[in-house]
Amino acid sequence: MIRAFGWNEFLVIVAAAQWTIALSAIAFAGGSVGGLLVALMRVADTRALRLSATGFIRVFQGTPLLMQLFLVFLGMNIFGFAINPWIAATIALALHASAFLGEIWRGCIEAVPKGQREAATALGLRYFRSMRHVILPQAARIAVAPTVGFLVQLIKGTSLASIIGFTELTRQGQIINNATFSPFLVFGTVATVYFLLCWPLSLIARRMETRFSRATAR
């Protein structure tokens, strides 16, 4: 039975945003840990580490996020490991974020002038201590704006988790639309909630980028 799109349906869609936020936050946290590891491997002196990190990045940057979600969700079930959509979406998005953040942060590390690393070496600091005390603090400042920009993309990417049955913002919108058959109102509301989540972050990223450009221009 088709019902009208009303206040209750609107509140249900807005409430579903909490799952989008939770999925984005967990995937971003996992991706940050993985991304830092990948970035350090990419700039390591050992060739095997660099090749391993490069292969990981190529696989996840060269395949659609949708396929990665299918492979994690359906692949685990094929091998006899039952996995629910929530965990599958978290793993797939965290791996996806690791690859992209790893490449972003690799660029930021390499943007630090080589003289800084040479100075750390001259002071007798080994690789990890020079990274921790000299290179990474400087690279972190450069990385803030592109990292926030990627977070915006990650939030929008969580909408694909609806394909494997995870009930987040987009999936809830589909369910409400099937009951009300009001696609313009339903998906207009869904799009507005996404916009309200992403727009402030986009402004922050743009402001940080401008501030960094002014600081480096002095």
Image: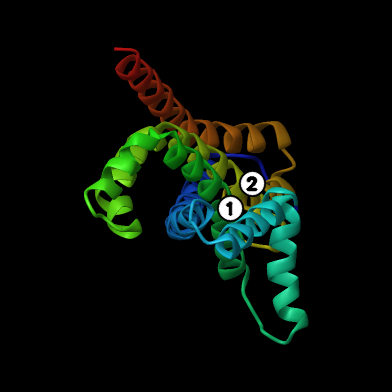
- Screen quadrant of the C terminus: top left
> Label 1 neighbourhood size at 10 Å, few (<14), some (14-19), many (20+)?
many
> Label 2 neighbourhood size at 10 Å, few (<14), some (14-19), many (20+)?
many
Task: Return the disc, 2 or 1, that comes first in the chain's sequence.
Answer: 1
User: In front: mark 2 or mark 1?
Assistant: 1
**Residue 164 location in percent, x, y?**
70, 62
Image point (38%, 33%), residue name: 113
Residue position for label 1: 99
Query: What is the three-letter code of the residue carrying label 1?
Result: Ala
**Residue 158 location in percent, x, y?**
59, 50
Image point (75%, 74%), residue name: 75
Q: How was this image coloured?
A: rainbow
Residue position for label 2: 173
Query: What is the three-letter code of the residue carrying label 2?
Result: Gly
**Residue 49 location in percent, x, y?**
56, 63
Q: Is residue 46 visible?
A: yes
**Residue 215 location in percent, x, y?**
30, 18
